[in-house]
């Protein structure tokens, strides 16, 4: 780490938890159950914090400030791309569902499909006959992936930092070391980062019932559960201060504010069996 002054040097050896808490700000309207962020809800709080600590801007944050774009300490200035743009940019990639713009070649697609009009609005058609019988005007046709499960890959600058698996809309945190699709998920996250220069972003992947992972969405929405919030805080802290958050501080955060979440999810994981799920019991 390159220290700017002696105070910064000495802080790294501090035994006072307040030295490490509220050192990352997040501008959001979401109510995240994690008290260690410095929350910014309006422009006045933004001005007070902008030049002191790193600021993460969530998609839902409504206030726009030129000061955000003047600061080198702000994460998430680049907007996430429209999903139709992603499909165009990565046409032919293994993780993009097959699509066509020419209805004459529609037979090469496997139904069901999603037909999109010029506004980007999609309508599902389960058979070719139903599509032909419709009166809609469409510009693009894409195969619909029937998911066995869904993974939300929360990434930071091309690297997955948290994964949530949704089975029957039941969200469970994934053990990153046991995730069998990590290599593929990392590759997709890296390609999206290289193309769009995103900081904190979600890569939503569908695992098809027929096999394979397919991209379903890319966004910067930060409706974080407590486990994810700690992960985001760690990533921003390490990147900005060029120093890891001490383990004793992390343990304090877990004990004070996250252990209740882990206990609840432990019971949830007993109901929904998955080979990927985090072992919540080790945090209790």
Image (tube, grey):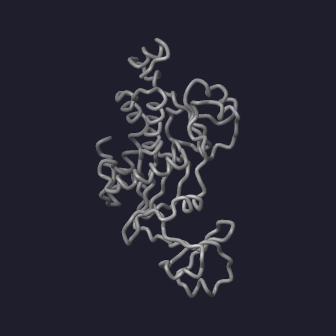
The percent coordinates of residue 133 (x first, y second) are: 63, 87
Q: Quadrant of the C terminus?
A: top left
Q: Across the whole image, how many numbered discs are drawn on residues?
A: 0
Question: At x 53% / y 54%, what residue is drawn?
Answer: 218
Image position of 180 (left or right of 170): left
The percent coordinates of residue 66 (x first, y second) are: 70, 34
182 vs 93: above or below? above
Viewer-nearest residue: 44 or 50:
50
The percent coordinates of residue 191 (x first, y second) are: 46, 51
94 vs 57: above or below? below
Q: Quadrant of the N terminus?
A: top left
Residue sitting at the far top: 6
Which of the 4 image quadrants contains residue 69?
Answer: top right
Question: At x 68% / y 77%, what residue is drawn?
Answer: 137
Regarding residue 284, the answer to whether it shows in the image is no
Question: At x 43% / y 15%, what residue is drawn?
Answer: 9
The percent coordinates of residue 230 (x first, y second) are: 44, 38
Regarding residue 43, the answer to whether it shows in the image is yes
Viewer-nearest residue: 105 or 145:
105
Which of the 4 image quadrants contains residue 10?
Answer: top left
Image position of 82 (left or right of 231): right
239 vs 152: above or below? above
131 vs 146: above or below? below
């Amino acid at each position: 780490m390159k220290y700017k002054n002696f105070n910064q040097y000495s802080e790294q050896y501090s035994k006072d938890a307040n030295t490490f808490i509220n050192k990352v700000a997040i501008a959001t309207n979401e109510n995240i159950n994690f008290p260690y962020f410095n929350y910014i809800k309006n422009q006045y709080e933004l001005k007070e914090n902008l030049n002191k600590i790193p600021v993460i801007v969530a998609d839902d944050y409504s206030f726009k400030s030129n000061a955000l774009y003047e600061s080198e300490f702000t994460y998430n200035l680049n907007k996430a791309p429209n999903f139709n743009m992603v499909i165009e940019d990565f046409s032919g990639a293994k993780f993009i569902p097959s699509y066509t713009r020419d209805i004459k070649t529609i037979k090469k697609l496997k139904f069901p499909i999603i037909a999109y009009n010029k506004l980007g609005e999609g309508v599902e058609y389960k058979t070719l006959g139903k599509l032909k019988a419709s009166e809609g005007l469409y510009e693009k046709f894409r195969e619909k992936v029937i998911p066995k499960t869904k993974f939300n890959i929360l990434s930071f600058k091309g690297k997955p930092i948290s994964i949530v698996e949704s089975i029957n809309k039941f969200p469970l945190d994934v053990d990153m070391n046991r995730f069998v699709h990590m290599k593929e998920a990392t590759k997709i996250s890296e390609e999206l980062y290289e193309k769009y220069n995103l900081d904190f972003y979600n890569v939503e992947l569908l695992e098809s019932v027929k096999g394979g992972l397919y991209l379903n969405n890319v966004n910067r929405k930060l409706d974080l559960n407590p486990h994810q919030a700690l992960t985001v805080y760690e990533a921003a802290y390490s990147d900005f201060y060029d120093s890891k958050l001490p383990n004793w501080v992390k343990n304090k955060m877990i004990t004070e504010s996250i252990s209740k979440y882990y206990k609840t999810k432990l019971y949830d994981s007993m109901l929904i069996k998955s080979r990927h799920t985090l072992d919540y019991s080790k945090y209790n």
